Amino acid sequence: MAQVYEEPKNFPARPDKTIDWLGKSRDDWKSKTRATKAELKVAKQAQKRARQSRQEWKEEYRKLQRQLAAVMAEKDKENLNLKTKVQELERENEDLKKKYLLRLMTKK
């Protein structure tokens, strides 16, 4: 019996072209991977900067809120003092009016 040699169908006809194609495919894959890694690195750095900036703005906001609260408390206190002074001056004005009217009445 003579054996007939059949070429397997899953092997390409030209191994040199297949090797070139595999090399090019690998190189393309590597360059895409490098590009993606570079993009990812840039995105991560941007995210880190944004997170840090956000944290700094939050701290600045809290600091300004505390300053605002202190100024408002001081102004409220000042406002209360001024209201008290106004009331005292109004009372004094009323007393002076009464004294003036009494003088006018007694002079007649």
Image: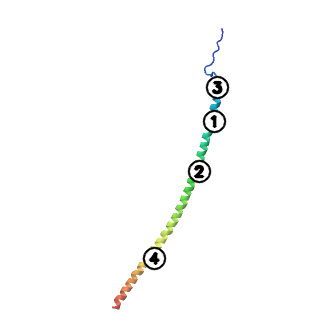
Callout 1 amino acid: Lys
Tell me which label, 1 or 2, sits earlier in the chain.
1
Label 1 vs label 3: CA separation? 20 Å
Mark 3 lies on residue: 17
Mark 2 lies on residue: 49
Label 1 vs label 2: CA separation? 28 Å
Label 1 neighbourhood size at 10 Å, few (<14), some (14-19), many (20+)? few
- Mark number displayed over residue 41: none
Identify the element where label 4 is drawn: helix
Q: Is residue 5 above or below residue 77?
A: above
The nearer-to-camera label among 1 and 2 is 1
33 left or right of 88 in image: right
Q: Mark 3 and mark 1 in contact (Cβ < 8 Å)?
A: no
Q: Is residue 13 above or below residue 85?
A: above
- Residue reaching furthest to the bottom: 108
Mark 1 lies on residue: 30
Mark 4 lies on residue: 85
User: For the point 37% across and 88% down, which residue is it?
Assistant: 103
Q: Position of residue 83 (x, y in %)?
A: 44, 73
Q: Position of residue 49 (x, y in %)?
A: 59, 50
Q: Position of residue 76 (x, y in %)?
A: 48, 69
Callout 2 amino acid: Arg
Label 4 vs label 1: CA separation? 81 Å
